[in-house]
Amino acid sequence: MSEATALLQQYLAQLAARGVTHVPLAAGSLSSIHRTATSPEAAATNPAPAAAVSSRKSDRLATLAAEAASSQACRALGTLRDTMVFATGSADAELMFIGEAPGAEEERLREPFVGATGQLLTKIIQAAGFKRSEVYLSNVCKFRPVVEDGKPQASRNCPPTQLEASACLPFILEEIRIIQPRVIVALGPIVSSSLGIEGAIADIRGQFHEHQGIPVMVTHNPSHLLQCAQNRDGVKEKRLVWEDILQVLKHLGRPVTAKQRAYFTNA
Ligand code: URA
């Protein structure tokens, strides 16, 4: 029996012990499992076709999302709300955006980056020449943090604490291992420090760092741009984020038009 088959058996036995009787499988997964179980050597020397690799990624993400939803480490903190918000976008994305935590809209729709901040990020993604569905969008923290001031939370949001981010950290690290993007964009200080990149955003943005051997561009969370929109620095800060995105496009070998290059230069 191959190591992969043994691990799979062990994992399914753990699920069964917890009372799980069915697991979701994407099309093609059964045949991949069958190939590995019946002929591990052939599976190793003849990698599965791209479609099978992709569905295997989706399966692994679905399993991970289920684990996040029942995470005892996150629940035990008592400072995170109950609804788990996982990720959205393509499992085959070459570009991965990582944010801090879901807010009220994300929690309501169970999808990252759909509130005001998310709409701004979507505009940035589109201005860079991608569809939202082509990239992978996720958060370090999978639950909306409770605003701890004793007043009703309503639509108020807050960034996760270091403790909250740490409790959820295994999930985003595994997502990175599964997606294997060509570039990660880390949106804000909680995200960069979670990936082991230390320093104030002003000092560490604008250059590539590395995590799991993958280039990481650190930049401001778009929520920072929304806060700055009210003051004189608004356009200047947008330009900084845009310059970081231009570097990402260059790294990915994507074409950049003169119009794109000039966005937000009227600071
Ligand atoms: N919405 C998210 O999902 N993540 C952020 O970091 C900000 C807003």
Image (spheres, rainbow, N blue to C red):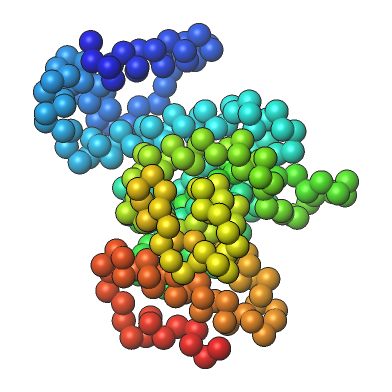
State left or right for residue 93 relative to residue 20: left
Relative to residue 254, is residue 34 depicted above or below? above
Query: Where residue 178 appears, x then y in whole percent?
Result: 36, 39
Q: Residue at x 40, y 53 (%)?
A: 210
Query: Where residue 77 appears, x then y in whole percent?
Result: 72, 33
Q: Residue at x 38, y 70 (%)?
A: 247
State left or right for residue 7 relative to residue 172: left
Q: Residue at x 86, y 49 (%)?
A: 149
Of the pair 224 and 16, the residue shown nearer to us: 224
Relative to residue 191, is residue 205 depicted above or below? below
Relative to residue 95, is residue 234 depicted above or below? below
Q: Residue 76 appears in which quarter of the rendering? A: top right
Q: Residue at x 69, y 46 (%)?
A: 161
Query: Where residue 113 appears, x then y in whole percent?
Result: 55, 56
Screen quadrant of the N terminus? top left
Residue reaching furthest to the right? 150
Relative to residue 52, is residue 161 depicted above or below? below
Of the pair 174 and 13, the residue shown nearer to us: 174
Of the pair 126 and 217, the residue shown nearer to us: 217
Query: Where residue 186 appears, x then y in whole percent?
Result: 50, 57
Q: Is residue 108 visible?
A: no
Q: Residue 212 appears in which quarter of the rendering? A: top left
Screen quadrant of the C terminus? bottom right
Q: Is residue 62 visible?
A: yes
